[in-house]
């Protein structure tokens, strides 16, 4: 059995719950208090979630976990069968994590730090808004970001882009509020809105 260490409302945890369900894999959730991550630190020597424990292996970082799940069960795939297309998906995932996430992270850090620079936040917000057009373009003539079938790219991006539509009133995470407030989904993003609804309807394992 896979054991999944998680905290409530975690975007990175949701990536893994979507991938687990896609693979038809069960997992036992271990819900942590966000203020007390001692259990995951003891297990993995770091304090970020998700972390999975399986057959004596401990794996942290959601993209790495998705790669592990692909090795564990190849069908249905998380990456295209064609090697070149699979590499395209992996490049997108790296861009999303290393480039796309910087503006919302920087805005959230500035807000939590208590001294936000309004001009800098406006520039970062504009960058987030422009990226919505790129996602809209990726969905031209296909239901998912890279193909007619859902892939790791969708699972990586969805938990962040979904905040363009709505936020749970009980979710008080600053980063999530930034995702909601700085992604102005408008009439020009109909395909993206439909994609968010489409992926949101997919199952998660476990149901956190």
Image (cartoon, grey):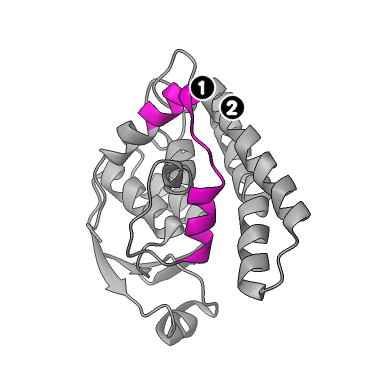
Label 1, residues with CA under 10 Å away: few <14, some 14-19, many ≥20: few
Instruction: Give the image location of residue 191, x and y in percent.
Output: 43, 22
Residue corresponding to mark 2? 133
Q: Residue at x 24, y 58 (%)?
A: 206
Extent of the magenta region: 173-195
Q: Residue at x 54, y 55 (%)?
A: 178
Q: Quadrant of the C terminus?
A: bottom left
Residue corresponding to mark 1? 188
Q: CA distance from mark 2 to mark 1?
A: 8 Å
Most extreme residue toward the front is 118
Q: Nearer the viewer, residue 6 or 33?
A: 33
Instruction: Give the image location of residue 87, x and y in percent.
Output: 60, 33
Give the structural element (helix, strand or loop) at label 1: helix
Verify CB contact (< 8 Å) between mark 2 and mark 1.
yes
Instruction: Give the image location of residue 45, x and y in percent.
Output: 54, 80
Q: Residue at x 38, y 72 (%)?
A: 56
Q: Is residue 1 visible?
A: no
Give the structural element (helix, strand or loop) at label 2: helix
* Mark 2 or mark 1: whose residue is earlier in sequence: 2
Q: Residue at x 48, y 48 (%)?
A: 160
Mark seen at residue 4: none
């Amino acid at each position: 059995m896979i054991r999944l260490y998680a905290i409530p409302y975690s975007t990175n945890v949701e990536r893994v719950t979507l991938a687990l369900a896609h693979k038809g894999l069960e997992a036992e959730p271990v819900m942590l208090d966000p203020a007390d991550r001692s259990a995951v630190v003891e297990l993995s020597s770091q304090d970020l979630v998700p972390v999975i424990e399986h057959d004596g292996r401990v794996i942290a970082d959601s993209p790495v976990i998705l790669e592990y799940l692909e090795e564990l069960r190849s069908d249905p795939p998380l990456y295209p069968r064609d090697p070149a297309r699979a590499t395209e998906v992996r490049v997108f995932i790296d861009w999303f994590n290393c480039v796309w996430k910087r503006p919302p992270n920087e805005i959230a850090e500035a807000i939590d730090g208590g001294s936000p620079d309004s001009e800098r936040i406006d520039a970062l917000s504009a960058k987030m808004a422009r990226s919505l057009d790129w996602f809209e373009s990726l969905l031209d003539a296909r239901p998912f970001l890279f193909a007619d079938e859902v892939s790791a790219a969708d699972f990586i991006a969805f938990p962040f882009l979904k905040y363009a539509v709505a936020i749970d009133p009980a979710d008080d995470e600053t980063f999530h509020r930034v995702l909601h407030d700085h992604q102005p989904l408008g009439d020009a993003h109909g395909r993206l809105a439909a994609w968010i609804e489409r992926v949101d309807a997919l199952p998660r394992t476990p149901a956190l």
